[in-house]
């Protein structure tokens, strides 16, 4: 978490030089920047819930531009907002943004080579970007790696929720890996059992997108930390991998086959293979997911309420339809949501749902915030400044 109270005079000095467009000594400038918490964060006079955040990039060779891809601020259709400015006769590229003080999200920086087309630059804000992004070498916060080998930096401002469990480390429990036939295909499944007394009943958190949680986000160490500091009761974690990105879009979302297979076959089998363990009841059996996985979690409440007592649906893909004719970019806040009509309109009794969305997630926000007509149903709807990507869903350890 960036503390703007640290070295305010040094931060002011760098910002003043940038604003004036004159760097007294370039070597000293970069030495000072490397010693500070970057991005540089300063308060906004008269707006205590906002911050000015200054990003820096050092160019080692001539560039057409540098693009800051900041989650839900400069990505998607807002690429122009993320274009950094070059300081003449220096190797400095910079951009200052005004952000909520509670912002938490991932970002990367993309160098744009000379001769890059406008179309290529415009695509850089989405999932089909052809230019590779890099983590911020000046950011001292732990990086995240969501997919592949690309690293991203995390910006966590001073009023953002603490995510100390996700600061890295090693797990101490047992990690079991196996291949299982689920929804008609062989998938890798991982079960993490924390190192707790065998007499303690274990809850169970089931996670679609298992490859992201286990390979990139370090869910095992995070669960250990959350248990050890008393934030959550002991739980095991069951991750179910996708075969590939295309198959992920085929199986996640509002597909009941995956949910029924998990509830009727996989969970009984997993528990039976650990006869020495005491397993908690359904009130501590959790299905958690984000995006398409968030819709899968809601499907768990609808199609397996006897199995899952708690569902965590974060940033659900409210645009999803069974016909797969909709896309996030085409979905507006006035559109009818199949998810709202078929999954949220008449939820089953006895299932708790935590339905969360980042406050900057566009058309998804009003759809998630719509009140449920089921007055006696236990909802927890919450808009968060933490944004859509995995830097926010890592809050799962706070919700179980």
Image (cartoon, helix red, strand yellow):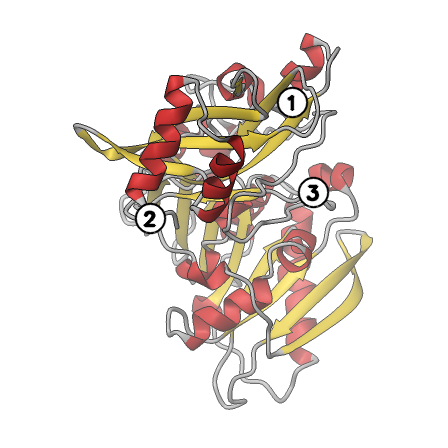
Residue on which the image places disc 1 = 124
Label 1–label 3 contact, CB within 8 A: no
Q: Is residue 209 left or right of residue 184?
A: left
User: Can residue 98 be seen at all in this image of the molecule?
Assistant: no
* Quarter where residue 295 is shown: top right
367 shown above or below 301: above
Q: Secondary structure at mark 3?
A: loop
Q: Is residue 236 left or right of residue 215?
A: left
Image coords of residue 252 (percent x, y): 65, 43
Q: Gap in Å between the C-alphas at discs 2 and 1?
A: 30 Å
For the residue carrying disc 3, how many other residues have a C-alpha within 10 Å: few (<14), some (14-19), or many (20+)? few
Q: Earlier in the sequence, mark 2 or mark 1?
A: 2
385 or 310, which is in the foreground? 385
Q: Nearer the viewer, residue 99 or 373?
A: 99
How many badges with numbers are in the image?
3
In the picture as drawn, the residue positioned furthest to the left comes out as 46
Residue extending farthest to the front is 25
Q: Which of the two residues, 8 or 119, is positioned nearer the viewer here?
A: 8
Q: Are marks 2 and 3 in contact (CB under 8 Å)?
A: no
Residue 174: x and y in percent read 65, 78
At label 1, counting other C-alpha atoms closer than 10 Å, the crowd grade (few under 14, some 14-19, many 20 or more) is: many
Q: Earlier in the sequence, mark 1 or mark 3?
A: 1
Residue 3's tag is 2
Image spot of residue 3 (x, y percent)? 33, 48
């Amino acid at each position: 978490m960036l503390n703007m109270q640290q070295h305010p005079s040094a931060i002011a000095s760098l910002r003043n030089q940038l604003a004036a467009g004159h760097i007294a000594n370039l070597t000293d400038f970069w030495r000072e920047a490397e010693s500070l918490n970057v991005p540089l964060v300063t308060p906004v006079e008269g707006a205590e819930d906002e911050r000015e955040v200054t990003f820096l990039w050092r160019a080692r060779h001539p560039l057409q531009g540098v693009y800051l891809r900041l989650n839900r601020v400069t990505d998607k259709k807002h690429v122009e907002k993320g274009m950094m400015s070059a300081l003449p006769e220096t190797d400095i590229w910079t951009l200052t943004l005004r952000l909520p003080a509670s912002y938490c999200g991932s970002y990367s920086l993309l160098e744009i080579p000379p001769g890059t087309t406008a179309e290529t630059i415009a695509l850089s804000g989405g999932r089909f970007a052809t230019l590779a992004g890099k983590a911020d070498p000046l950011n001292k916060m732990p990086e995240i790696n969501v997919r592949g080998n690309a690293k991203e930096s995390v910006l966590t401002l001073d009023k953002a929720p603490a995510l100390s469990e996700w600061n890295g480390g090693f797990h101490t429990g047992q990690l079991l890996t196996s291949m299982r036939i689920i929804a008609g295909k062989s998938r890798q499944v991982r079960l993490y059992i924390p190192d707790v007394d065998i007499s303690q009943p274990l809850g169970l958190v089931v996670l679609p997108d298992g490859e992201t949680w286990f390979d990139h986000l370090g869910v095992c160490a995070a669960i250990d930390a959350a248990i050890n500091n008393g934030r959550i009761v002991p739980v095991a974690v069951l991750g179910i991998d996708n075969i590939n990105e295309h198959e992920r879009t085929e199986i996640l979302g509002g597909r009941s086959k995956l949910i029924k297979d998990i509830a009727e076959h996989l969970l009984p089998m997993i528990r039976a293979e650990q006869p020495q363990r005491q397993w908690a009841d359904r009130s501590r059996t959790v299905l958690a997911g984000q995006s398409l996985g968030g819709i899968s979690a809601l499907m768990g409440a609808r199609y397996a309420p006897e199995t899952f007592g708690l569902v965590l649906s974060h940033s659900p893909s409210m645009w999803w339809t069974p016909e797969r004719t909709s896309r996030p970019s085409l979905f507006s806040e006035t559109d009818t949501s199949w998810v709202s009509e078929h999954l949220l309109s008449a939820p089953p009794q006895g299932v708790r749902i935590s339905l969360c969305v980042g406050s900057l997630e566009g058309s998804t926000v009003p759809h998630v915030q719509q009140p449920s007509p089921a007055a006696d149903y236990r909802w927890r709807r919450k808009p968060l400044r933490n944004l859509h990507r995995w830097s926010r869903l890592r809050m799962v350890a706070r919700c179980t």
